Each structure stands twice: as structure tokens, then as C-alpha cells.
Image: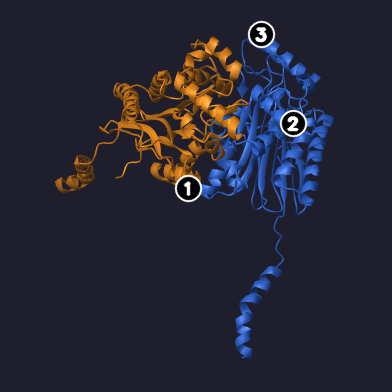
Chain colours: A blue, B orange
Amino acid sequence: MRFVSIISVLPLLLIAACSLAPEAPSINWAIAVHGGAGTMSRDAPAAQLKAYEDAMTRALVLGKGMLADGASALDVCEAVMRSMEDNPMFNAGKGAVFNEQGKHELDASIMDGSTMRCGAVAGVRTVKHPISLARKVMADTRHVLLSGDGAEKFADVAGVERVENSYFDTEKRRRSLQRLLRERKRTGSLVPSDQSMDYGTVGCVVRDRDGRLAAATTTGGMTGKKWGRIGDSPIIGAGNYADEYAAVSCTGTGEEFIRHSIARSVTARMAHGGETLQQACSAVIHDVLKQGDGGLIAVDRDGNIATPFNSSGMYRAMADSRGRFEVAIFPIER
Amino acid sequence: MRFVSIISVLPLLLIAACSLAPEAPSINWAIAVHGGAGTMSRDAPAAQLKAYEDAMTRALVLGKGMLADGASALDVCEAVMRSMEDNPMFNAGKGAVFNEQGKHELDASIMDGSTMRCGAVAGVRTVKHPISLARKVMADTRHVLLSGDGAEKFADVAGVERVENSYFDTEKRRRSLQRLLRERKRTGSLVPSDQSMDYGTVGCVVRDRDGRLAAATTTGGMTGKKWGRIGDSPIIGAGNYADEYAAVSCTGTGEEFIRHSIARSVTARMAHGGETLQQACSAVIHDVLKQGDGGLIAVDRDGNIATPFNSSGMYRAMADSRGRFEVAIFPIER
């Protein structure tokens, strides 16, 4: 009898032994944030680079604290985006670039990978926090994408704060527009030679402690844009996406991200091609897109983080429940 | 020597024999067209069903003739869409549904799978042929998506014909709006109980004799829409997509097609999951989407055609260079 009972508990003993092995604990939560990709230079003034690192750190600390307190992926994404929309250093909310008419038109989107619900707004001019309006579109309507004046009417219905368009003004961005318009006049080219004018789309991707994934992105678009141009940020599947495999937020030359459905391609490669998060992200950034197009941040359901880019730099920061905490601008040699 | 030379030509003889076998000739060109999916009834007046079949037939004959003459996939897509935009039976161009304010706002997109170039317009009110404006966005700008007033300014630059918004009016669509507004007032619900009011998004997918794939889609959106709502038709990857694997045009509840990046998912499943066109199309319509969401038309690089839908019907027509010519509305038992 005693012999039999030892045999019968052997599998349990084996399982117990395995769980005692010194493996790394699984990741409880993970977060990544970006503040735009582009042709940053290591020769930029140290104080300027430091200011961006500090801004990325503050956004990350906010999200990390909420996640440690058990906040949902969606709440963390919205809160981090709001804080970055308020920061004039970034091209989103206060500090957004000017369009050709000297106005601001903002785009944003948010997606909850655990429910596949999503919301987005394009071309809004008077909404202080576009990401919150995108979330209201997701939560309060049966729609995904609202645009222009109509989206602002919905902001009133939804109780989302509106401001004068001039609230978004900053001197730095105004000088960028003036430089671009002079260049357009001189060369006739619509394409700015200095892409640094557009830096600063912001994004956040999160895996919360309940395993839910969410992604959010906000942008002011391109300096001097016209004709109601909409980029990839408010396009679900292009600049932003979340499902059960991964949450993805992109930044760069929006048209290229739309053309190749970049955010959705990451999760499709994982779902249908069996690729890991790192493989899928690396493929879309380095094989599908062209050098200089931009980058993305992504997190998968296991809390792995990827932040590939093919531009000279990308403002980015990432943290997880195992103590990872990194802030970077340029490629890191490992 | 003679013996050796017979051995050496044997492989060539085998290849010649194989090519003489009575196999079906490969498909030179193929085309599919849709005129919307929804809750059509087999009990509808026979004359009404016949009118839609005739309209689909005319669109198909136009495209088929151009393809037999060697036209490019892109030219065929644009020409077929223009003819359907002119037909008041469809919810695109003349005959488009009314928004809540009693106006028309049109969306369209076009994509060339052989170059990955694409163009789209959203919320245009005065452009007679939205598909031609989308093509101009693709050909003449570095952008993918233009919207609203800005897109109309670009129409003037690009030389695309503009009309009064009332040009798109039809009595049938006006009655639909009035019915919807009465129902909204009575029930408080924003969701129409009769989805038939929105039928008629149009789309075309083509494989031309040079193997190039292209897709195009135009819609007036949803009856009574408000807040600048944009559906899936102008969203590259959602309602329309073309690459080297397939060309896809969708119709149905736009938000669901955006949420799951349906058009892009078809080609992603083929590229990364090794699925056939039929498998990929069937999976997204029957496994990913919900019953009643709608359908799609697709063609792959071998000229295979798929036209799955999960609604009660979808106006559709398809032809290829091997003599296939089919027009249908309801599911076909094979």
C-alpha cells in the first residue's frame, strides 16, 4: 500500500521539483512608450537629448506605477498618452506641428486586444486630449473612426474637453512651419528636406497583470500637411493595433505604415506564421519597410517587448514587473 | 553516341509530353465585382432582383471587355467603379445614402498590388467619381488618404470633376433616411432595424493578363451617419487591399472589417500561413467575422476568385479568360 501511494504521488513531486527550479519568474506586466522616430543625431546638444530622456522616463514611471497598482492596460495607455499629449516636446496635443494653414489637426487611436474593441479620431482641431476622445468613440459608439467637425460634435456629447486651436501652438513648431514654407517656395518640393520637423508622434503599448494587451497612438501628423491628409496613427491596423498576440504602436512615414498594414502585420505574422514578437517586428521594420521609414514598439502576451526602428533614432522607454527599466534614443550595441 | 544523345534529350521529351497533356489552360485574366452585401430576400419582386443582376452584368461586361483588350488591372478597376458610381442603384456616387444632415459623404480607395501604391479619400461631398480622386491621390501625391474639404481642394488641383452635393440625391435613399430618423426618434436607437437601407457599396478586383492585381471600393457609407463617421472602404487593409498575393474588396458593417483588418488578413494568411485564396477568404468571413457582417470579393495571382459572405445575399459577378461568367445574389448550392 505504502509503495503504491509513493508511486501515485511521484508525478506531483516531479511537478513540485520543477516549479522550485531557479527559473526567472514570468512577467506580470510590461509597458513600452515611444515619442517618435527620425533622424536624431548623437551630436545634438546633450541637454536636449537629456530632456527627451527625462520626458520618456516620466511617462514610463507613470505607467509603471499604475501597472504595479493593478490598473488595466487600457487605463494605462490612456493616462500615459494624456501626459505625453500635455508635453510640448512631443508632436501630439500641446506641441503638435502646424499644417499648411498654420493650424493643428490631431489624430489618435486606441485598441483593447482583449475585446478587439477600438476607437479613433482623425483631423480634430479643438480636442485637448485626442486619445480620450478615441477611447470615447470605442466605449460609447458603435463606430471605430470619427473625423473632423463631426468628431468634435461628438466630443461635446461625450464630455471630452475642448480648447482653442491656438492652445496647441509652440514657437518651435511655428518656426518649423515657416522653414518648410520657405523651402517649398524656393524648391517647389512638397517634401521637406529636414524630416526632424515632424518628430514626436507618441505611443504606448501595455500588457497588464491580467494578461490584457492594449495600444494607443496620438500625433499631430506632418508639418505643413494639407488637403486633409490623414496618416497611419488613427488607422487601426496601420499605426496602431492590439489583439490576443500583441499590442503595437508605430511612428514614422505614415503612408508606408498604411501601405503595408504594419501594426496588423506584426500580429498576423505571429498568428499565421508562428513568428515570435521579435521576429515579426524585425521583419516588418527591416525587410518590409525602407531604411528611414521609422519604427514601432510592441509587447506580446508573455510580456516580451520589441522596439525596432530603421531611422537613426527613436525616443523609447520600456519597463516590466521583473525590474526592467530602460530609456534610449539611439541603437544600442548588445 | 546516338544512344547517349537520346538519353540526353529524354527530359526535354518528358517536358514536351506534359505540356501537351489536356490540362485546363492557365487563367490569363480574371475579374470580380460586388454591389454590396446585406439581408436581401429571395421573396423580393423578381423585377427588382433582375434589375440588380442586369446592373452587375453590365459592370462585368465592361471590365471583361477591357481585360480581353489588354487593359491594366488598375484601369479596369477605375472604369468599372466609375460606371457603378454613376448607377443610382448602388450606394456610391449617384444614389449614395444620406447622412443625418441630409447630405452625402463618399469614401473610396484603390490599390495596385504590383507596386503597393494606393490612394483613398474619405468624407468627400462634391466629387462625382470618388474612385478617380483616390487614384489621383495615389498617382500624384506622396499621401495615401485625404479627407473632407482638403480632399476637395486637391480634386481641383488634380482636375477631378466636382458636382453639387444634391447631384447624388435619389428618392429611394431619401425615404430611407426619413424612415431611419423616424425610427431613431421613436426608439432612441441609433442602430437601424432595417439594414437594407445601406446596401450598395461597390467594389472591383482584377488580375490582368500581365499578372498584376488591383482592388477598388467606393461607398456612401451608412444611412443617417453622423459625427464624421468613416467606415472601412477608404481604409487600406480594412475594406480594400492588393499585394502580390491577392486583391480584396469588402462590403458590410465597416467597423467589423476595420477591427479585424479583413482585407489585409486575407493576404497575410496566404503569405504567412500558406492558405489558399479560398481558405483565407472563408476563414475571415466565417470564422473571424460574425453572421450578418457582410462579405468580400477577392482574386489571387493565379486568377482564382472567391466571393464569400455571411449575410443573406451579396450582389456579385465574376468572369475570367477561360470563359467563366457568373452573376449571383444569393448563396449557390454546388
Which is more foreground, mark 2 or mark 3?
2
Q: Choose mark 2 or mark 1, whichever is in front.
A: 2
Q: Distance between the residues labelled 2 and 3?
A: 39 Å
Dot 3 falls on a residue whose secondary structure is helix
Q: Name the residue under label 1.
A: B287
The subunit carrying tag 2 is A
Three-letter code, disc 2: Val
- Among the 4 quarters of the image, the one containing residue B231: top right
Query: Of the residues under marks 2 and 3, which one precedes in the sequence?
Result: 2
Q: In which quarter of the image is the N terminus of chain A?
A: bottom right
Q: Find residue A214 and report its image quarter.
A: top right
Instruction: Give the percent coordinates (x, y) of residue B213.
Output: 41, 30
- Distance from the alpha carbon under mark 2 to that under mark 1: 36 Å
Residue A331 is at least partly visible in this image: yes
Q: What secondary structure is marked by label 2?
A: loop
In the rendered image, which residue does mark 3 sit on? Answer: A185
Q: Is residue A81 above or below residue B52?
A: below
Q: Which residue bears the numbered disc 2?
A: A160
- Residues at circles 2 and 1 in contact by the CB criterion of under 8 Å: no
- Identify the amino acid type marked 1: Asp
Of B185 and B54, which appears nearest the observer?
B185
Q: How crowded is mark 2: few (under 14 residues within 10 Å), some or many (20 or more)?
A: some
Q: Say whether residue B332 is left or right of residue B109.
A: left
Does residue B256 appear to the left or right of B71 in the view shown?
right
Task: Please name whichever residue, B160 or A181, is drawn nearer the observer in this view of the structure.
Answer: B160
Answer above or below: position of B6 versus A290. below
- Front residue of B231 and A274: B231
The reply to whether the C-beta atoms of the residues labelled 3 and 1 are less than 8 Å apart is no
CA–CA distance in space, label 3 to label 1: 53 Å
Q: Does B99 appear above or below A133? A: above
For disc 1, the chain is B
The label shown at residue B274 is: none
